[in-house]
Amino acid sequence: MAKLLKSPLLLLHIFLLSLLSLKTIASPATQAGALIKWKNSLLPSSFLSSWSSTNLTNLCKWNGLVCDSTGTVSEIVISGANLNGTLAQFNFTPFLNVTRFDFSNNLLRGPIPSEIGQLTRLEYVSFYNNYLNGTIPYQFSNLQKVWYLDLGSNYLVTPDWSKFLSMPLLTRLSFAYNYLTSGFPGFILYCQNLTYLDLAQNQLNGTLPEMVFTNLDKLEYLNLTDNQFQGPVSPNITKLFKLIDLRLGRNKFSGQILEDIGSMSNLQIIEMYNNSFEGKIPSSIGQLKQLSKFYLDWNALNSTIPSELGHCTNLTYLALASNSLTGELPMSLTNLIKITELGLSVNNLSGEISPYFFSNWTELISLQLQSNLFTGKIPLEIGMLTKLVLVLLYNNTFTGSIPSEVGNLKDLTELDLSNNHLSGPIPLALWNLTNLQTLQLFLNNLTGTIPPAIGNMTSLQGIDLSANQLYGELPNTISRLRNLQNISLHTNNFAGPLPECLRNCSLLQRVRFDGNNFNGNITNAFGVHPNLYFISLNDNQFIGKISPQWAKCESLTTLEMGRNRISGEIPAELMNLTQLHSLILDSNELSGKIPSELGNLSLYKLNLCKNHLTGEIPQRLGSLDQLQELDLSENKLTGNIPKELENCDRLLSLDLSNNNLSGEIPSELGNLIALSVLLDLSSNSLSGMIPSNLAKLTRLESLNISHNQLSGEIPASFISMASLISTSIDFSDNKLTGQIPTSKVFEEAPANAYIGNSGLCGNATGLSTCYTDSTKKKHSNTVLIAVLIPVCGVLLLAIIVAVLIIFYRKAKFHDEESRSIGETDGNCDSLIWERESKFTFGDLVKATEDFNEKYCVGKDTSNWTTIAGSYGYMAPELALTMRLTDKCDVYSFGVVALEVIMGRHPRELLSSLTFKPSTATSISDSAEILLKDVLDQRLPPPTGHIAEKVVFVVTIALACVRDSPEARPTMRFVAQELSAQIQACLSDQFDMITISKLTGLQK
């Protein structure tokens, strides 16, 4: 019984002790100790200098702390104090009574401790703008008294939203600028007192739950910008009737803009830019009388601008850019007298700009109408918009001159009227815009000169007057433009030397003077420009040398001086331009060797073609492993192609043509598998075989190795080079033999791709079909036809030889019989051949009068085979272009006849003939060859009637080898002439007869 009486007393003691412990935990001393411990875990901060163990009695005077009536901390507000560290050492237990916790705008990192959920009296929590990471602790939802929660601008990631409780008193919530993913956080849907919700700049996705619009009807601010929400916006959004600020920009919303959006009468800001909204701008927008900012740019709207928009007279910012809006600007927009920024660019708006717009929009600061279809003149009233800072009217079709009233826009910092049809001179008043920083007038039809007044524009940083018709010299006053960074005057008619004062523009970054008529010595025209990264002086008439001073422009990435008259050597000092990517010095008068030091650079493009460079290609160019284009063509380079070029494995184009390079093509070039645009090694002295390794260049489109001394076959493996273009391959003028690759690319190449290679064959224009065993068996009839010409030729030759032998023998042993041949009164009108000859030519007629085109090689091109032994006897149209005519056999007969008469193949005689389109074949002026000198010198010179017969046979043969098939006689004509009883006698002595006199036979 005594024990039971003692129990209540024991419980009372325990209760009193617990109160004492709570008082001890929340005492100023314990709070001070906790804060000092946390301070010591941070980097030193002057803001926390008052937090000291020697100042424990003044806790309530420490920076960032607010105490209640008990002397304990009730608020911790340490915003913008540059606190650097974590919250790991922060002890939350002594601060259970704290109502405000503000650590915004510091450098805190690491996770937010879940213990913060113990501070159940908290009403205001902000960790905005720190470097906190990890998940958002679900214990935040234990803070049921919190009305303000801002965790924005950190690196927080998605928690398990299902663990979060509703926070009924929450009115302002921001998770913006974090890395939250998945769908809309579900617990927010039950925070029905929210007036401010900011989830911008996350990666939230999916469609918006309907409860956003039905449960959160107290929202005044809704920001979902920069997420991945998608789908149409629910019609229930109009239930957010208290909404003032709606921001849905940069998402994936689609569909049409709600027609009744005008019922949300409190809206002042609408941001729906950068989505996929389509259709029209609803006319109900005119009901939003309080609307001040309207962003619909970067969508797919395709209507006209509704005239009702002019009723939104409080609009200060209107952005409808980058849609497909059409039509003219409605005149009702003149009511927008408060408009300060107008962005209608990148649409299909058309028509002229009414002067009334400019006269009413006097508050305009920014006018952006670029990239539309506006026409007409720029209204003079633009001069009334004196507050303008930015004017962008480029990419339209404005005509007329630039209004001089532009000179009234004294606050203007950027003016872009480029790519229009403006004409006339640049108004002098424009050069007085001393605040102008950027002037863009390129791609117009402006004329005149740049006046000295340009020196007034001391704020100018960039000027582009390119692609106009400006002329004259650059004024020296350009030296006053000390802030000038970019100057582009290319494609005009400027002339004269560059002003020396240009050297004073030390801030230059980009210079384009190409495509003018500038002249003078370029050597010292520029100084040291440490920020210069691009300069193009191409296509002018500069002389002088490339100064080593360029090496001091250490930021240069592009140096272009092509197509001038610059001479001297390429300075080795350019190796110091470690950021140089493009070096263009083509079409000048540079001499000397290519500096091997260029191999130290990081070039993407190197063009030194059309100069007078000598020596070998430096092996160190192989170190340019970033190089994409190399052009050294049309120089005087010698030696071998360096195999080290294989290390330039990003090359897209390689041109070494028209030099004096020798040796073999390095097989290593086949390792340049990125090569796709061009490989040109033509017009050198390269020898040896074509490396089969080049077949690895499967991306290559153009290949030219013509005009060399290459031998052997074109590798069959080239069939894998499927990207080659038939019209862009050239193997001509080498010593190549064998069959071309059997692919469409090579078979469809033009005839001139293979000319000058006597041994190439294949199924391509200009080549004979190659002979194989299989084709021999399959087309034996074609082979028979192929040898028909030589057989017929032998038959004819046998007859001619027989005739000649008879005549020679008769002349030597039976002179009296020869004299018995009938003559006609000494006039030599005709000669009658004796019986033997008559019989021989009768047989010839019989043998040839049925010899027609069906016996010609190539009648059926689908059955051609290699014509062994026929080269040198084939007609040129057949040998070179596979053109089949009925005179192909005639040419072959003529060659054979001349070969019998001369005792050797007549190739030298044929090459001396100059073929003309006329019916006759003539001899070049330097080749008046005597007939007696071309006859077989092993036989005695013919005399008498034998000489007459020889002259006649040669005359017939020369007619047969005329270049034009139409100029040759028919075979029947030849046979009839040779078998005729009457022949013309000689009118000149045999020793004086020239070949040229025997070329006039008429058919």
Image (cartoon, rainbow, N blue to C red):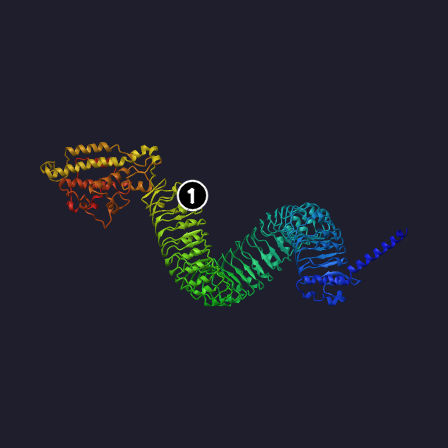
Residue 239 in view (yes/no): no
Q: Which residue is mark 1?
A: 720
List x then y, in percent, for residue 92.
73, 57
- Picture residue at 27% right of the left edge, 36% below the top: 789
Q: Is residue 300 left or right of residue 762?
A: right
Residue sitting nearer the eye, 514 or 307? 514
Give the percent coordinates (x, y) of residue 15: 83, 55
Most distant residue in the right direction = 1
Secondary element at tag 1: helix
Foreground of the two, 785 or 500: 785
Residue 491, horizontal then vertical, whole percent: 45, 58
Residue 795 is drawn in which quadrant?
top left
Residue 497, above or below 178: below
- Viewport quadrant of the C terminus: top left
Q: Is residue 603 left or right of residue 224?
A: left
Residue sitting at the far left: 816
Q: Is residue 806 visible?
A: yes
Would you place residue 817 above or below residue 175 in this image? above
The amino acid pointed to by label 1 is Ser
Q: Quadrant of residue 778?
A: top left
